[in-house]
Image: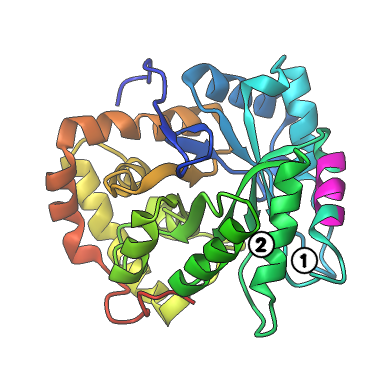
Amino acid sequence: MSMPTKSVPHRRLGTAGPEVSVLSLGSWHIYDRMDFHDAVAMVRRAVDLGINLFDVGVYGIPGEPPVFTDVLFSAIVRAAGIERDEYLLSTKLWLEPYPEQSLREQLERAMFRAGTDHADVAVLGDIRRDDLDLRALAGDLAELERDGLIGCWGVNNWSATAVRTVREHAVEAGSPGPQLAQLKYSPCRRSIPDGEPFARVFAEGVSMQASDVMEGGILARGKVSRQIGRDPGGVRDRIVQAAPVLAGIAEELEATPAQLCIAYTLTHPSVATVLFGASSLRQLEDNVAALEVLEKTGAERLRSLIEPLWADRDAVDPEGP
């Protein structure tokens, strides 16, 4: 695949969010394990290619060594000469300590670490409890929007009903509501993003940010040794088995498996941006070249080729967690 030369196109996030690049760069366990000079060159190149959305959510685990990917990101953009108005910053807000720890306190700590005074996008983490007050949560988010601490917000792996419910409360509180739903989406995980419950969410103006598009690297490399995300439906073994089939399809298209995963997720009409991690300049440029794969192959043919790899069909409720 040739070196990408075109600027990465942008799409509107939701109905009230910013224009975001259709490819967004994640940082989960990325900058912590990169040479600093290499990270600076990669992020500089990403911005030059048109990528403007950077996810710097921190995924630290109690009892494990601390992570500093967000702190490093603040140093990387300074070293790369990238001004704050040249990129959009996305951060995570966690619901486990809420409301004992307020969203405002979480956000201020995150922004202190990232070296900025606001987040352009705040994404609420998974709901893992039964007593979450969605009305109060929506009110707190509306206040953060009014105070300019966040530009807009979204949710990560929520059920369709929870997204629609919090949206109703947010509108009542004077907020536009969630502008994105971050969902696991790949050639193998399709039941939730392609299902009818989320079709109604998207019809109301919420965009999708596709995440885990390579199943933590399994679909790109066949196997991985580092920590990867949850396995809804318990279908990871099926995905491991699908990886060589995906690689064969990619070879026929003169593409890499990673490019095929990214190109596939961009065929969904409600995807505003696809989130991926890259740990080298070459990997970044290879992934951006997925845009050429999509243009060359076409969405209809791509979806037809990928159809047999749907691993979570009938294994996951389309309503979501």
Q: Name the residue under label 1.
A: 61
Percent of width and height locating residue 22: 42, 35
Q: Is the magenta stretch mostly helix, strand or loop?
A: helix
Which numbered mark, 2 or 1, is in the foreground of this view?
Answer: 2
Give the residue at x 56% y 22%: 47
Q: Quadrant of residue 171?
A: bottom right
Image: 81 above or below 206: above
Front position in the image: 61 or 168: 168
Q: Where is residue 130 in the image (x, y as percent from the top left)?
A: 65, 85
Q: Mark 2 points at which residue?
A: 138
User: Left or right of 176: which side holds 202?
Assistant: left
Q: Callout 1: helix, strand or loop? A: loop
| Quarter of the rendering containing residue 52 | top right
Q: What stretch is highlighted in magenta?
A: 105-112
Check the picture and name the quadrant holding the N terminus.
top left
Front residue of 32/306: it is 306
Residue 321 lies, in percent from the top left, at 49, 77
Residue at 53% of width from left, 61% of height from top? 167
Counting labels gives: 2
Front-most of residues 299 and 138: 138
- Using residue 274 as the reference point, say whether residue 28 is left or right of it: right
> Compared with residue 136, is residue 76 higher up or lower down, i.e. above or below?
above
Dot 2 falls on a residue whose secondary structure is helix
Estimate how packed mark 1 is, as few (under 14), some (14 to 19) or many (20 or more) residues with alpha carbons within 10 Å. Answer: few
The tag earlier along the polypeptide, 2 or 1, is 1
Which residue is at the far bottom?
130
Q: What residue type is labelled 2?
A: Ala
Identify which residue is drawn at 77% across, 19% down.
79
The type of residue carrying mark 1 is Ile
147 magenta-colored: no
Whether residue 157 is visible: no
Q: Who's the residue at 34% across and 49% down the image? A: 270
